[in-house]
Image (tube, rainbow, N blue to C red):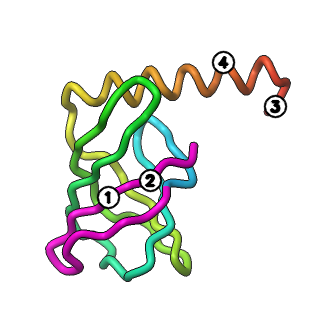
Amino acid sequence: MHVPITIHSRSGGTLKGDSVDLSESGIAAILPIEVPLGELVELEFTLPFGDVKTYAVVRQKSAFRYGFQFVSENAESEVIHSTCRQLEMEKSLLGEP
């Protein structure tokens, strides 16, 4: 799932990036500026089922790719869940693993 993402970071300010992966527990994104591992950030992005504004912790970094783990259950959790279900259905219809 590739969508534009905005990250609000205490150390880096407001950053723009692009997501490269999505699951119900987190999202990965390509960012132009470093964000420290372990930092709590606010994420904003739009999925097919609606807008998402949630908190996450920076858990992984590999070059410019960052992994964020969602830490808050909120109304947007259903948007993420519905999108993940839809992606799984599309993958199974296409015969992808």
The disc at residue 39 is none
Residue 87 in percent (x, y) is at: 61, 27
- Residue at 21%, 32% in the rendered image: 73
Q: On the image, numbered disc 1 is attached to which residue?
A: 6
Can you tell which quarter of the image residue 91 is in? top right
The chief SS type of the magenta part is strand
Residues at marks 2 and 1, CA–CA distance in whole angstroms: 7 Å
Return the disc, 1 or 3, that comes first in the chain's sequence.
Answer: 1
Mark nearer the viewer, 4 or 2: 2
Return the disc, 4 or 2, that comes first in the chain's sequence.
Answer: 2
Q: On the image, numbered disc 3 is attached to which residue?
A: 96
Residues at marks 2 and 3, CA–CA distance in whole angstroms: 24 Å
| Nearer-the-camera pick, 96 or 16 | 16
Label 3: how many residues lie within 10 Å, few (<14), some (14-19) or many (20+)? few
Residues at marks 4 and 2, CA–CA distance in whole angstroms: 23 Å
Element assignment for label 2: strand
**Residue 96, placed above or below residue 89:** below
- Residue at 52%, 70% in the rendered image: 65
Residues at marks 1 and 3, CA–CA distance in whole angstroms: 29 Å
Q: On the image, numbered disc 4 is attached to which residue?
A: 89
Q: On the image, numbered disc 2 is attached to which residue?
A: 4
Residue 10 in percent (x, y) is at: 14, 73
Identity, as a three-letter code, of the amino acid under mark 3 = Glu
